[in-house]
């Protein structure tokens, strides 16, 4: 495991959406560490519906840029992690999830009941609800990876500017995949982005009920 260069607090405070990357390749072991942080994320029922396609070759980055409104950083980054959710993942993975859980101490009674509750829950979703559920889960893993990369001294850029159908075509994704966001990882080239500021707590946080200040 690479030594971390920044604490979590520093990574959170210093992270900016990187405007431009210098394109230097990323060592495989660093990429591995970043991806592992994503895989360690929590998810509903531990179903881990995320799937990641890592794009590093110049040709494929160029094609992906074409599917991402021509955003230059897609091509300049060392690696672009395309974060997807698999709407059918739960069907294929439920046995594996229960097996892993049992090995880690999941009670047998929970395992017996989880199979039904997971199926009932997932089957109750329409396509939009499934996409909402996938967005929620995949973005947790995405954020784990973004902050791990920042802690390791990399720069990152999260991106939602892409066309779903075009990314599908470039990456040859299965139909059940839903592309959630792109995470560009690399090293900053030139000046970093200005700090856009954040609303203060009184604007966005309430205590006990809507509209009441947090004491
Ligand atoms: C999920 C997500 C998607 C984003 N998509 C894009 C994008 O496609 N292109 C872009 O230039 N910036 C994109 N951004 C960057 C935001 O504009 C940026 O995070 C925001 O302005 C705050 O700036 P900061 O991240 O430097 O603090 C995205 C950010 C997030 C979190």
Image (tube, rainbow, N blue to C red):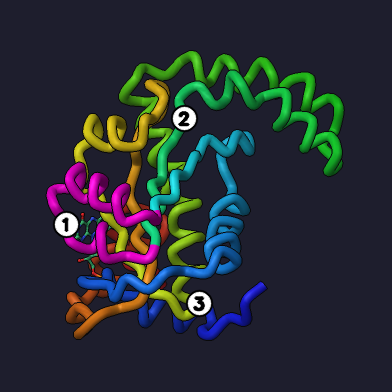
Judged from the image, the quadrant occupied by ligand 1 is bottom left
Q: Residue at x 28, y 30 (%)?
A: 169
| Residue stretch rendered in magenta on the structure | 56-78
Q: How many marks?
A: 3
Residue 86: image tag: 2
Cα distance, mark 3 to mark 1?
Answer: 25 Å
Q: Position of residue 106 (x, y in %)?
A: 82, 37
Residue that badge 1 annotates: 71
Residue neighbourhood size for the residue with mark 1, other residues' Cα within 10 Å, grouped as few (<14), some (14–19), many (≥20): some
Q: Secondary structure at mark 2?
A: strand
Cα distance, mark 3 to mark 2?
Answer: 28 Å
Cα distance, mark 2 to mark 1?
Answer: 25 Å
* N-terminal label among 3 and 1: 1
Dominant secondary structure of the residues highlighted in magenta in the image: helix
Residue that badge 3 annotates: 151
Question: Horizontal placement of 4 versus 190: left or right?
Answer: right
Q: Position of residue 173 (x, y in %)?
A: 39, 30
* N-terminal label among 2 and 1: 1
* N-terminal label among 3 and 2: 2
| Near-viewer residue (157 or 102) | 157
Residue 93 within the segment the image draws in magenta: no
Closer mark to the observer between disc 2 and disc 1: 1
- Mark 1 lies within 8 Å of ligand 1 (Cβ measured): yes
Residue 119: image tag: none
Quadrant holding the N terminus:
bottom right
Q: Residue at x 72, y 29 (%)?
A: 96
Indicate whether 169 appears above or below 92: below
Indicate whether 161 appears above or below 115: below
Q: Residue at x 36, y 25 (%)?
A: 129
Residue neighbourhood size for the residue with mark 3, other residues' Cα within 10 Å, grouped as few (<14), some (14–19), many (≥20): many
Residue 61 within the segment the image draws in magenta: yes
Q: Residue at x 42, y 57 (%)?
A: 208
């Amino acid at each position: 495991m690479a030594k971390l260069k920044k604490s979590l607090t520093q990574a959170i405070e210093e992270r900016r959406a990187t405007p431009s990357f210098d394109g230097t390749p990323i060592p495989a072991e660093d990429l591995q560490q970043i991806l592992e942080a994503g895989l360690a994320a929590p998810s509903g029922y531990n179903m881990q519906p995320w799937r990641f396609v890592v794009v590093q070759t110049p040709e494929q980055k160029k094609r992906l840029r074409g599917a991402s409104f021509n955003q230059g950083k897609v091509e300049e980054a060392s690696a672009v992690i395309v974060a997807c959710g698999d709407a059918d993942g739960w069907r294929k993975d439920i046995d594996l999830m229960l097996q892993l859980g049992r090995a880690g101490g999941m009670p047998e009674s929970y395992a017996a009941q989880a199979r039904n509750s997971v199926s009932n829950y997932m089957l109750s979703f329409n396509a939009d609800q499934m996409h909402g559920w996938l967005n929620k889960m995949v973005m947790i893993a995405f954020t784990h990876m973004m902050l791990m990369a920042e802690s390791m001294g990399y720069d990152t850029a999260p991106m939602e500017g892409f066309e779903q159908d075009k990314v599908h075509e470039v990456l040859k994704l299965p139909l059940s995949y839903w592309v959630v966001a792109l995470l560009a990882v690399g090293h900053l080239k030139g000046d970093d982005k200005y700090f856009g500021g954040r609303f203060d707590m009184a604007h966005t946080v309430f205590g006990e009920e809507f509209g009441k200040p947090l004491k």
